[in-house]
Amino acid sequence: MDPSMLALIEQFNALDDSLYFPHWPKPTDGSLSRIEAHFGVKLPPLLVSLARNSRRFGQRFASIGPNHDSPQHIIRINSYWRRRRRTRRVPRGYVIVTDEHDDNMPH
């Protein structure tokens, strides 16, 4: 793994341990292929490395693992926001990677 990627993962892991965070299953080659085919994009290598190597990935990001039926899975979150009325829906070509927002992010 690239040393700069490893340093970023270590910084991410050093965040406040007192915060609750779910533990998503680690992404598999099959789950990544399914997500990438669904959206027609290649997931960023840093996101995949973070999901595979960080113990706290679920604290900030949607699952990219094989738990496709979970409401917190990246496909389910994006499906929800693509069904919203036109003024609230996510534009085509965008992929939501977290369901966090300013009102529920720890400060």
Image (cartoon, helix red, strand yellow):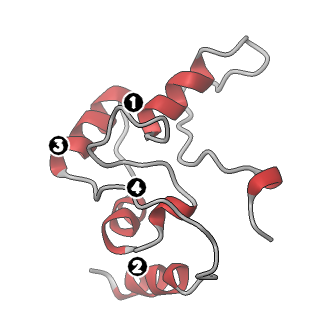
Secondary structure of the residue carrying tag 1 is helix
Amino acid at pointer 3: Gly
Residue in the picture at 35% in, 61% down: 45
Residue in the picture at 48% in, 35% down: 71
Which residue is identified by label 1? 39
In the picture, the disc for residue 44 is: 4
Hey, which quadrant is residue 27 in on the image? bottom left
Residue in the picture at 36% in, 48% down: 64
First in sequence: mark 2 vs mark 1: 2
Mark 2 Cα-neighbour bin, 10 Å: few <14, some 14–19, many ≥20? some
- Mark 1 in CB contact with mark 3 (< 8 angstroms): no
Mark 4 Cα-neighbour bin, 10 Å: few <14, some 14–19, many ≥20? few
Amino acid at pointer 2: Met
Q: Nearer the viewer, mark 3 or mark 4?
A: 3
- Mark 2 in CB contact with mark 4 (< 8 angstroms): no
Which residue is identified by label 3? 30
First in sequence: mark 4 vs mark 1: 1
Q: In the visual, does 48 lie left or right of 101?
A: left
- Quarter of the N terminus within the rendering: bottom left
